Image (tube, grey):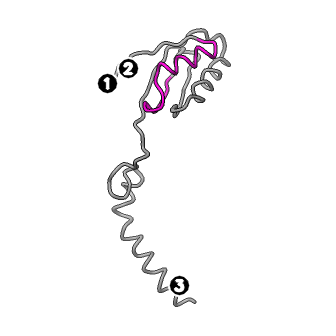
Amino acid sequence: MKKILKAVALPVLLAVLALAPTSWPRLTQGQGIYGVMPAHAAEVRTARLALKGLTCASCKYAVKAALNNLDGVEQADVSYKKMTATVLYDPDMTTPQQMVEVIEKAGYQAEVQPNEAK
């Protein structure tokens, strides 16, 4: 059994070590083994929304929950202090206008802010 294990394990280990220096950086950067992005990797965009109607710090959690329940939203950060929301989203699944609509359904007002950095 030990001979079989050595005969199989050693070549596999050597193959992994031989691949590791070239493939590992590409894999960890999401480029796949052949230097191509995986087909499921979608473009993520950022939307900035100005908020109105938040009367307490708990309101931010209601807005955040509404946004996170929207399909295509990757991450939503809401600031009660600044009255803004920053949303990472997949443009193939949702739009900033749909984000405004779900915020309004939750009882608050929102407006899409233009992106300053392009």
Question: Which quadrant: the C terminus?
Answer: top left
Which portion, as a residue range, is magenta?
A: 86-108
Mark 1 crowdedness (10 Å alpha carbons): few <14, some 14-19, many ≥20:
few
Residue 43 picture quarter: top left
Residue 101 on the magenta span: yes
Residue 62 on the magenta span: no
Amino acid type, callout 3: Leu
User: Looking at the picture, how far across and down is residue 15, in whole percent?
Assistant: 39, 73
| Label located before the other in sequence (3 or 2) | 3
Q: Which residue is mark 3?
A: 5
Question: Marks 1 and 2: in contact by CB < 8 Å?
Answer: yes
Q: Which residue is found at the position 40% from the left and 70% from the top?
A: 17
Q: Which residue is found at the position 33% from the left and 51% from the top?
A: 36
Amino acid type, callout 1: Lys
User: Looking at the picture, how far across and down is residue 91, in whole percent?
Assistant: 43, 30
Residue 115 bears which disc, if any?
2
Query: Quick check: 113 left or right of 63?
Result: left
Q: Secondary structure at mark 2?
A: loop
Residue 118 bears which disc, if any?
1
Reply above or below: 65 against 105. below
> Between residues 73 and 39, which one lies in front from this camera angle?
39
| Label located before the other in sequence (3 or 1) | 3
User: Looking at the picture, how far across and down is residue 106, in whole percent?
Assistant: 63, 17
Q: Which residue is found at the position 37% from the left and 58% from the top?
A: 33
